[in-house]
Amino acid sequence: MPSLEQRLTDYLETITGSAPVLREMAGPAESRLPLFLRERYRLRTIGLFGRECLLALETPGWDTGSPAEYAAHAQAMRNQFPEPVTLVVPQAASYARNRMVRAGTPFIVPGSQLFMPFMMVDLRERFAAPETEAGQHFTPAAQCILLYHLQRQPLQGLPLQDIARLTGYSAMMVTRVKEEWEANRLCQTSRIGRTTVVEFAAAGRELWQIAEPHFTSPAKKSHWIRWDHPEPAALEAGFTALSRTTMVEDDPTPTWALPRAAFRSLRENGTLHTVGRPGEANARMEEWSYDPALLSEGPGVDPLSLVLSLRGDSDDRVQQQLQTVLDGAFSR
C-alpha cells in the first residue's frame, strides 16, 4: 500500500492539477511540540495556490482518533505556530468528518476528503458504503462484535487489534465499529501508547438495553430448501433453536442459519436446493448478515441473536419465551 505521504501528493495533484512537493520544515520545528505529538505526527510544508501550508502527517501504527482528539491535537499545534496546521490522517468515518468540520479542525483524508477552511474544501465521499450515523441501526459487524462482548468474552479494556484478532474482523473494520459505538454513546476510547482501548458505558443487561434500539434481526432472508446432508457449519435457528430451551414447540420443518455467503456457495455447488413451496422442503434456511458460529457455543444460534431474529413475532407466547431466553442470557 502506498505511504500516507504518497497518497497525499497523488490526491492533491488530482485537485490542483500539478504534483505538489512536500518539504521538511526548516529548523527543529517539531521540537516545539509535546512528546506525544512528536511521536504521532511528522511536520511538512507544502505550497498550494501560492500559499505555504503546514501539514501534520500521522505516522503509521496509530488507531484512528476521535474528532475531539484530533481537534485537541490541531489546537496544540496551532499554539506553537503562527499558521493553521492541517492534520493528514489515513481514514475518518463520515460522522467523524462532520464533527471535525463543525469544530473547524483542518484535515485531509487522502483520496476521500479535504477540509482547509482558510483555503479550500473538498468533501467528496468515496466510501464503498455510507457509514452508520448516530441513531441508526448497527452494521452487521458492530452488532456481532457487541453481542460477542455480551456473551462470549468481555472486550472491555482491550486494544482494537486484540478485538480484531478475537473476532476475525479486520483492524479497519473494528475501527469503524468502534466509531459506530462511540456515535451512539455505547463506549469511549482511551489511548495507551500507540493503541486504542475500548471502555463501554455500561455492562451486561444495561448495555443491552442501551444498544437494543440499534439492533436488527440478523436473519435477512428465509428460504425453503432441500438437502440430504445438512452442512455441519449450519446452526439451528428460529423455532428449532427456541424449542431446545423453552416450551415452544418446534415446527415440523427444522430451521437452520448460515451466513449469507456460505448459503449462496452451497446453493451454487448443489449441496442444497431452494424450492418453491413448504411441502417440497425438508428444511428452512435463514440467511444471516453475520456468521452465527462466531457467537454460538452449541448446536444452535446464540441466545441474543435468537431473540433479535424472533422479536418481531406477534404471538404473545413466543414473546414470553423470548423473555425467558433473555433472562437466561444475563443470569450466567
Image (spheres, grey):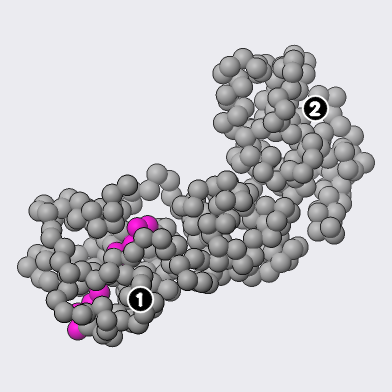
Q: What residue lies at 79% left-to-right and 36% top-to-bottom?
A: 299
Is residue 64 located in the magenta-colored stretch of the structure? Answer: no
The residue range painted magenta reads 82-91
Q: Quadrant of residue 8?
A: bottom left
Task: Reply above or below: 110 against 168.
Answer: below
Q: 133 or 40, which lies in front?
A: 40
Q: Which residue does the image show at 17% across and 74% down from the upper left?
A: 25
Question: Residue 84's spot in the image, x, y percent?
Answer: 23, 77
Name which residue type carries label 2.
Pro
Q: Quadrant of the C terminus?
A: bottom right
Residue 166 x %, y %: 61, 51
**Residue 37: which numbered mark, if any?**
1
Which SS class for mark 2?
loop
At x 51%, y 72%, the residue is 192
Q: Is residue 290 above or below residue 176?
A: above
Q: Amino acid at mark 1?
A: Leu
- Which element type, helix, strand or loop, lies under badge 1? helix
Secondary structure predominantly adopted by residues drawn in magenta = loop
Rendered image quadrant of residue 280 = top right
Is tag 2's residue or tag 1's residue first in the polypeptide sequence? 1
Query: Which residue is the site of mark 2?
Result: 254
Gap in angstroms between the C-alphas marked 2 and 1: 58 Å
Residue visible at 55% across and 52% down in the picture: 164
User: Residue 123 location, x and y as percent?
Assistant: 29, 58
Determine the residue located farthest toward the right in the rendered image. 247
Can you tell which of label 2 and label 1 is closer to the viewer?
1
Q: Using residue 244 as the reference point, say whether residue 183 is left or right of it.
A: left
Whole-percent x, y for residue 108 in the image: 28, 62
Give the side of residue 158 with respect to residue 64, left or right: right
